[in-house]
Amino acid sequence: MKSNTIYPPMSEREISGAAISREAATQGMVLLKNINGVLPLKGRGKIALFGNGAARTIRGGTGSGDPFNGGLSGGGDQDVDQSLRYHINILNAMETEGFEIVNREQQMAWARCYDLAKREMKDQVMSVFAFPEETLTTEKLEEYAKETETAICVISRNSGEGNDRFMKKEVSIGDKKYEIGDYRLSAVEMDNLKKLRSAFSSLVLVLNVPGSISVQDLEAACADAILLMGQAGQEGGAAVTDILTGKATPSGKLTATWAKKYEDYPTAGNFLQDFNKAVYTEGIYVGYRYFDTFNVEPGYPFGYGLSYTTFALGNLEASLDEDTLVLGVTVENTGAFAGREVVQAYVSAPVSEMDMPEQELKGFQKTMLLAPGEKEDIKIRIPLRNLASYSENAGGYILSKGDYGVRIGTSSRDTKPVCKIRLEQTALTEQVLVELPLTETLEEKKGLTDRKDETIWKDVPVLLAVQIPETLDSRSAYSDEKVVTYATDTSYQPVMPYETVRYVEKKEWKLNDVASGRVSMEEFAAQLDAAQLADLCCGTGWGVQDENNPVIGASSESVPGAAGETTHALESYGVSSIVLADGPGGVRITQQFEATDLESGEKRQVYHYCTAWPVGTLLAQSFDPEILEQVGCGMAADMQAMRIDLLLGPGMNIQRDPMCGRNFEYFSEDPLISGKMASAMVRGLQSLPGGGGCIKHYAANNQETNRNAVDSVIGQRALREIYLEPYKIAIQESQPLSIMSSYNLINGVPTADSYDLCTDLARGEWGFEGLIMTDWNGGSSTPWKSMHAGNDLIMPGGKGRAMNILQAVRTVMPEFDERGQVIMVQEVPFAPVFAARWNSFTVDPEGPDTVMAPLGEGHTAEMKDGEILVDGEKVYMQANDMKTFFNDPASFVPKICPANEEVAFILDDGRAIGYKGHLDKKPRLCLGDVQRCAVHNLRIILKCMGL
């Protein structure tokens, strides 16, 4: 299908972004198999291409991770998938490179069917489109095989936000049902591969997938070569062509273990087994920590990846520089192609204090591009405190007494012993508090409780650790949960037991007074009343304020499709709003729209195209923080051009199980890789003034099924060593401007409502200085509880959530219109769903309190058949909910529950209505809670304003 859309020429920014995206994609692609040097392809002649992903290559997952789906306004232009300007498919790239596709006509005919089915899909933003593979015939394949010896089959998959993966699934196209492959290959795919293997001398599989698939199915295909291209962004087709032709040598390494079969994963028995609870019985034994410890043979191990060339590691050496291990190795390119190698350092800790995994990645470094025969000396420095493990009994992180075995290699299953580090006594390296404790018994898997005295260690040097790292006291200074309220009214007294009051002078400060040092941020915030503070701690709703009436030429251009923005209500104080856009696959906003030029008053088309980057997993597979920082810089350029202040990314949850539908956004099963890659990307995102990144989803958001309410039950050690460690690394190494809390609960507490998570850990232990925001709508969290927890910004916010905060601070009377109808405010622009403004009052026929709604001039209330009518029409007390709207939009009624004689009565001869119920007069929150969150928000707003 040919695109009818006319796209603008690429700007210099877009050209630069495309080049970085293509380079990053090639660096992260992993060569899994290559028998007899089938790859790179020889010459540029005829070739046969098969699979949906050949002509319709998938650039990335769905939902907020796809920058080309139009942002929150939804439904991006599908023609972009057929535009070489913004989306390069493999077939087109191969033709551009000079190949003749012998089965082109067949491929494109099937692609047109694919396009038609995709256009008919109702939800173009959050749904995962799947289309069956064409059944190949032996006759046709034999015909193609007469023209070429080589077939490339692209196995493509997609997944996305709000959806977990399947083994296989069934879809309906028209009136027919088809089996679609996901983790497993479908029957049609298996049969096609069998026929391809029989017909062609050389068979190459290209995996255009979001995560691992069944290695046993791949092995059954008997392919000569397998290349994991992943989901490589808009330049994916060009990047994989660079690898296939040898323009670039593959150098990526797996950041997650690929099992031979799904049942080999430690989570296979309980992942998604309970809709409401995810029990992490595997403990710290995630990914290779499990496979290596329990001797489960993987299909492809963690850290694995082949090259077109070969490398030799020599001159292995190790020494201690005070309390830092220094590893040295010389890497030599011993093959015929230029290439890069990744040196990986693994450490096996002693088991003198507690059970341990077989080994853990503790350091890595990628070489420069080495020409054949060229060498590079690599140094990897590992602070000894990074070898510590968490011990709840010891109250922190310990280095256990005994020998630490250190290996260097090129994958988790291809290493050589280098040395042992000997500690004569157990040492406490960091003292911390127990945070997010378990509230129920959890039986966790246990690893090694003794280590065999293997002969591989007999000839390695033993380094005695003389200088032990000092003990850090990282116990949160905020663990007492005390809050200071800054008051300008000297009559203000504490309302909560944890509150103290500090009185400050009332003045007409502006935010730039804080920037110039004339007043502290706390004193500035004290000038604001509770309602203003609540507004400052809530976004303005979905999208940006003027999204439906975009303008250009203003100092604050509207950004249609943005995820949201902060309040405009404090502009008189010099507080600007900041705009947030989805990531981390690229800036996700509306690409094309009509706007009014403020100078001429004319309407004109505006183009907001940004780069679609490779997904997080593919980027991390580069094992190269430098390329991730370059990607971050490219994102920063897009943000600056689009006037975006915060990008909602990178995503950095752990890939606990391959069936998580959002794994493509995340970096790895390993916390070190995840943390280092996130740090690098954030440094790039924050390389230009006025913008930054938001690491997410904090924390343990490892599934999409029931993500809004699932309770992640995790032990303290696993929580700290696996799921929180990446955030700790990113915060301490790159200080992101923001963190996004996740939807789920951890050990019974919604993450946004968790003081332990938001304040004690992020700020108290790790020194985070930015703002923490909810994910959109906050999952199971409650805005006023989030304020005390230190989750500073409720997104997308809206007046209803601001009111939730305000009425926790003080009593807020209900609001009525002139008919005595409780006011109902539309909370979202895309649905007729309202919030009833009862505020601190709850309607209840047994309630001891009453409130009165006086009617306006000319309106009269009466009781008829047990219901109250005003001017002959019913008065309603409740608003229908979002779930009901989406279940049946056609018959949806916005207002429900008419006022009746059980809860309402007539007053003043029909000139007022009284309601029975409970008026909440007890504060649940102090002003200082909200001030503290507002201060965090204001500091980031100040940075984004460039002040």
Image (spheres, rainbow, N blue to C red):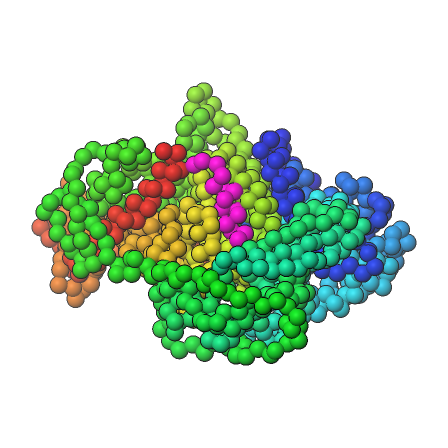
Q: Residue furthest top?
A: 600
Q: Position of residue 504 (x, y in %)?
A: 17, 42
Q: Is residue 35 left or right of residue 751?
A: right
In the depicted structure, whether residue 898 falls above or below residue 798: below
Residue in the image at 67% along x and 47% along y: 368
Q: Position of residue 251 (x, y in %)?
A: 69, 52
Q: Is residue 203 left or right of residue 755?
A: right
Residue in the image at 36% along x and 73% along y: 439
Q: Which residues are magenta?
A: 676-690
Q: Is residue 16 or residue 145 the one in the foreground?
A: 16
Residue in the image at 39% along x and 71% along y: 394
Magenta segment main secondary structure: helix
Q: Is residue 619 left or right of residue 821?
A: right
Residue 194 shows up from this direction? yes
Q: Is residue 929 magenta?
A: no
In the depicted structure, whether residue 428 falls above or below residue 8: below
How many marks do you count on the picture?
A: 0
Q: Is residue 681 or residue 469 the one in the foreground?
A: 469
In the depicted structure, whether residue 77 falls above or below residue 150: above
Q: Position of residue 544 (x, y in %)?
A: 41, 40
Residue 183 shows up from this direction? no
Quadrant of the rendering where the N terminus is positioned = top right
Quadrant of the rendering where the C terminus is positioned = top left
Q: Position of residue 68 (x, y in %)?
A: 56, 44
Residue in the image at 46% along x and 75% along y: 353
